[in-house]
Amino acid sequence: MDASLPKPDLLDRFTQIVGEGHVLREAADLAPRLVENRGLYHGRSPLLLKPSSTQEVAAIMTLASQTGTPIVPQTGNTGLVGGQTPRETGGDIILSLERMNRILDVDPVANVLVAEGGAILADVQKAAEAVNRLFPLSLGSEGSCRIGGNLSTNAGGTAVLAYGNMRQLCLGLEVVLPTGEIWNGLRRLKKDNTGYDLRDLFIGAEGTLGVITAAVLKLFPRPAGHQVAFAGISSPEDALHLFEKASNLCGGALTGFELMPRLGVEFTTRHIAGVRDPLPAPYPWYVLIDISTSDKAETAEVMVQSLLEQGFEAGLVQDAVIASSVAQEQALWHMRESMSDAQKPEGGSIKHDVSVPVSKIPAFMEEAARAVTSAMPGARICAFGHLGDGNIHYNISQPLSDDMAGDKPAFLARWREINGIVHAIVLAAGGSISAEHGIGQLKRDELAQIRSPIEMALMYRIKQAFDPAGIMNPGKVVALP
Ligand SMILES: Cc1cc2nc3c(=O)[nH]c(=O)nc-3n(C[C@H](O)[C@H](O)[C@H](O)COP(=O)(O)OP(=O)(O)OC[C@H]3O[C@@H](n4cnc5c(N)ncnc54)[C@H](O)[C@@H]3O)c2cc1C
C-alpha cells in the first residue's frame, strides 16, 4: 500500500464521526462521485463522508488538519471545471453535504432565506415561492446543484442581468475552516462595513478556503408580469443593437437576453425530445428575451410588444414569437438550456466559458470564428449564452470532415490549443477566461499565466493564511509555488 494514502484505521476514525451508514467506501458506490459531468476528470478516493451537522463537519476538518488528510467538498457534483473531483493520487477524502439540505428559516418581510450548504437550488426556489417570494438564481442544473456549490463557484445563470450572480444574492455565511474552527457569519445585513469582507473571500473559492455549511440568501418580490420572446436576427451585431433598445425600454425589467446560433437550434431540434423550431423559417442567429415587471402583467406585455416593434422598424428583428402561455415560456427556455446537452450526440465539443465587455461581443465572435476555423477547418461553432452579461459559452463541435469524422479523441486532444486561440482574443478584448464556471483543475495553470505576479502572490498568501496545511481541496484554483 502507498504510504502516502490514508490507512484503514484513519478511514475508520473519519467514518465514526458521521456513522457507518453515512459513508461510501465501496468502489461501485464511489464511482459516480469520482467523475464530473463532462467526463474530463476521473479522480480516486477511498472514502466519501456525509455529515449531518456543522459540528460533524468541524470534527472532520479537525481530524483532517491533525492528520494532514486532503478534503474535497462536493455537493451536487454538477461543476464544470473539475473542482469537486478528487485528484488521481487516491488520498483525497470527499466531504458531501447532501444530508445538510434543510431550509432553516424564511423571512418574507426581511426578504431573506437561510439554508444549509447542501440544500438543492430548486428546493430553495420552491421555499421562496411558498411565501410569494423569488430566489432568482436559475441554472440548467438547478434540480441537482446545491447552495454550497453555487456559492463556491459564484454561479451565474439566466437572471444575472437583473439580479446579479451568487455573490450578489448572499448576505451571510457559516463556514468550517480547514483547522476545524467554525466561523459564524450568518448575518442578515444589507449594510455592514466592518473590516475585510470574509464572506466574499469564500464565495467563488471553489472549496479551497473552507467548507460553506449554511448561508443567508436574498429574496425578491415575485414579478407580477412576465413575458418571453424569441426573435430571428441576422447577426450578433444586430443582437447588440436590439439589446441596447431593450435596456433603454425595460431598464431593470430586462431579466434575460440570450444569444443563440442557428446551429444550436438545429442541434436542439434534432436531439432534444419535444424541442421544435419556434419560427417557420431559419435565421442565422436568435435572441431570447425575458422581461419581468413588478407592477402589473400588462406592463410586461406592452414592453415586449414595443421592443419587437422597434426591432422590426430598425430592421434588427426578422421574425419573432411571443410566448402565450407558461408552457410556451418554458419551452423556449428549455431550448436555450438544452443547447449544451444537444451537442453531445454531435461528437466531441471543446468548451469555453468566457466574458468580454458587452459592446465587444460582435467583434469577438467574428475574430474567434476566423481564428478557430483557420486552425481547424470545418470546426462547427455553437457559440451561445448570456449576451446581456457579456458571457458566451463558445463551444466548438467536432468537424464533419473526413479526417476528423468519428475521431473524437483526436479532436479533443486539441482542447488546450483551441482554448489558447480563443482565450488570447478574449484577453485582448479585456475579457475573462472564466465567466461563471470557475477555475477548478481545468484552468488552474492558465490562471497563473494570465494574472499578474502581484495578483497571484496575493492569492497564494490568502490560500496559505486560511489553509496553512494545504488540505482544503488541494490542486484546485491555485497550486502553491
Ligand atoms: C446542465 C448544466 C447547466 C449549468 N448551467 C450553469 C449556468 O448557467 N451558470 C453557472 O454558473 N453554472 C452552470 N453550471 C455549472 C454548475 O451547475 C454550477 O457550477 C453549480 O453552482 C455547482 O453546484 P454543485 O452543488 O453541483 O457543486 P459541485 O459540483 O459539487 O462543486 C463545485 C465546486 O464547489 C466546491 N464546493 C461544493 N460544495 C461546497 C461547500 N459546501 N463548501 C465549499 N466548497 C464547496 C467544490 O469543491 C467544487 O470546487 C451548469 C452545469 C450543468 C451540468
Image (spheres, rainbow, N blue to C red):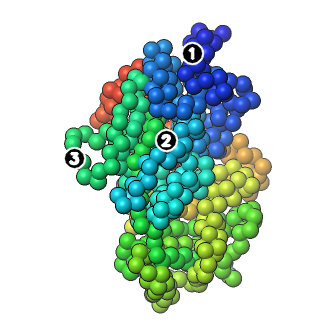
In this rendering, position of residue 336 left or right of residue 295: right
Callout 1 secondary element:
helix
Image quadrant where residue 15 sits: top right
How busy is the neighbourhood of tag 3: few (under 14 within 10 Å), some, or many (20 plus)? few
Q: Position of residue 420 (x, y in %)?
A: 51, 46
Q: Position of residue 480 (x, y in %)?
A: 41, 26
Quarter of the picture containing the C terminus is: top left
Callout 3 secondary element:
loop
Q: Which residue is mark 3?
A: 193
Q: Does 264 appear above or below 398? A: below
How busy is the neighbourhood of tag 2: few (under 14 within 10 Å), some, or many (20 plus)? many
Q: CA distance from mark 2 to mark 3?
A: 25 Å
| Mark sitting earlier along the chain (3/1) | 1
Image quadrant where residue 357 sits: bottom left
Of the numbered discs in the image, which one, if any, rests on residue 117?
A: 2
Q: Amino acid at mark 2?
A: Gly
Of the numbered discs in the image, which one, if any, rests on residue 441?
A: none
Q: Is residue 175 visible?
A: yes
User: Is disc 2's CB within 8 Å of ligand 1?
Assistant: yes
At 38% from the left edge and 42% from the top edge, which residue is drawn? 173
Q: Position of residue 287 (x, y in %)?
A: 54, 73
Q: Does 131 appear above or below 375? A: below
